[in-house]
Amino acid sequence: MNILILAGSLWKGGNADILVEAFASGAIPRRRVDVVSVNDFKISRHQEW
């Protein structure tokens, strides 16, 4: 079982990031945990051409 955490904190190293890291470190041993910060991506709605 893999775990994917989508972190959307506005501030790097803020409270939400601390919570995400605590959750990831407390995951069941031998499980793959990936943390993706959605703020690292430019996400916008699709616009018609």
Image (cartoon, grey):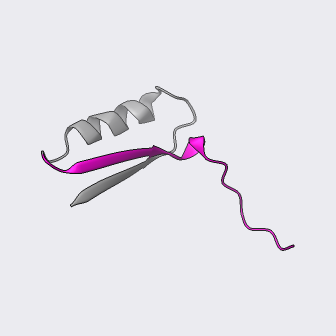
Relative horizontal placement of residue 29, taking residue 36 as reference (left or right): left
Residue name at image x 27 percent, y 41 percent: 23
Q: Is residue 48 magenta?
A: yes
Is residue 11 depicted above or below 26 in this figure? above
Residue name at image x 74 percent, y 67 percent: 46
Relative image position of residue 44 (x, y in whole percent): 71, 57
Q: Which residue lies furthest to the left in this view?
A: 29
Question: Which span of residues is magenta-colored?
Answer: 30-49
Q: Is residue 20 magenta?
A: no
Relative horizontal placement of residue 31, taking residue 36 as reference (left or right): left
Quadrant of the rendered image containing residue 10:
top right
Is residue 37 depicted above or below 12 in this figure? below
Relative image position of residue 49 (x, y in whole percent): 87, 73
Relative image position of residue 25 (x, y in whole percent): 23, 36
Say how many tags the image has.
0
Quadrant of the rendered image containing residue 21:
top left
Relative image position of residue 12 (x, y in whole percent): 52, 28
Relative horizontal placement of residue 26, taking residue 46 as reference (left or right): left
Residue name at image x 19 percent, y 39 percent: 26
Is residue 38 depicted above or below 16 in this figure? below
The quadrant of the picture occupied by the N terminus is: bottom left
Q: Residue furthest right?
A: 49
Residue name at image x 13 percent, y 48 percent: 30
Q: Residue furthest top?
A: 13
